[in-house]
Image (cartoon, rainbow, N blue to C red):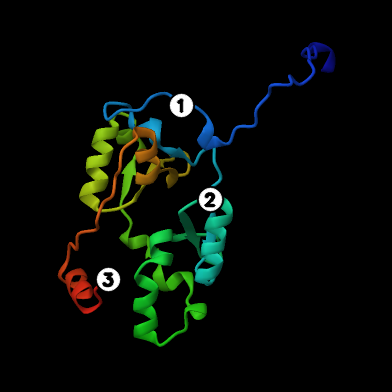
Amino acid sequence: MDALFHPLPTTPLPANTDLLHLEDRPGRPVTHDSCALEVMTDLRVLDPVSITEDATLDAAHALMVSRAIRLLFITDDDGHLTGLVTATDVLGERPMQRIHQDGKRHSELLVRDVMTPRAELDTLMLKDVSHAKVGQLIATMKQLGRQHALVVEHNAHSGHHELCGLFSTSHIARRLGVSLNFIRVPQTFSEIQQRLTHPA
């Protein structure tokens, strides 16, 4: 088998070779009319970073810092996706609310105390995203009032849906060179009551 393939030529490493991090690599210019896939984090080629529900908030924050990310996928003991947690969840008002409600110390708070459970997550279908523009995606995320949007595709072989992509307003903002700060607008009475009872 080896006789069928010829080795490639090699050359000494050039003296002016630079080490570029992902965020330093020049990408194609992105505008509101660009294909939405241009700003999607493709989880088919990047391994999603996850943590278990019973991990502490401090552990979740440390993992985010070490990986330079602002979102973690949450799994149960069997490795099944049960939700997600963002840096805003970890560092925002949710921990203080749980401290007041449950009488816990911050060091006792777990990821499950502040995570967004799977049942409350909205997703986009890859087939829709593939034909959408960045401007449409921004309008969608603004309507949802979220900093992140998940993308799924249907696996015809298994019959299941698979998480294949992630959108982040901070990433989109960097690519566009603009600010995208969305404020979550309460959509239900319970959410409004929560805001009134526990103001930021």
Q: Position of residue 46 (x, y in %)?
A: 54, 41
Disc ID at residue 68? 2
Residue 156 appears in the figure: no
**Which element is circle 2 on?**
loop
Q: Amino acid at mark 1?
A: Gly
Residue behind mark 3: 200
Residue farthest to the front, as pictured? 16
- Image coordinates of residue 155 in percent, x first then y, are 44, 40
Residue ID at (29%, 33%): 134
Label 1 sits on a secondary structure element that is loop
Residue drawn 30% across the image and 43% down it? 179
The disc at residue 56 is none
Left of 68 or right of it: where is 145? left
Q: CA distance from mark 3 to mark 2?
A: 26 Å
- Mark 3 or mark 2: name the one nearer the start of the chain: 2
Judging by the rendered image, the residue that carries numbered circle 1 is: 27
**Quadrant (top left, top right, bottom left, bottom right) of the C terminus:** bottom left
Kind of residue at badge 2: Ala
- For residue 4, which quarter of the picture? top right
**Is label 3 in contact with label 2 (beta carbons under 8 Å)?**
no
SS under mark 3: loop
Distance from Cα at disc 1 to Cα at disc 2: 19 Å
In which image quadrant can residue 127 be found? top left
- Residues at discs 3 and 1 in contact (Cβ within 8 Å): no
Q: Residues within 10 Å of mark 2 (few under 14, many from 20)?
A: few
What is the residue that sits farthest to the left in this orientation?
A: 189
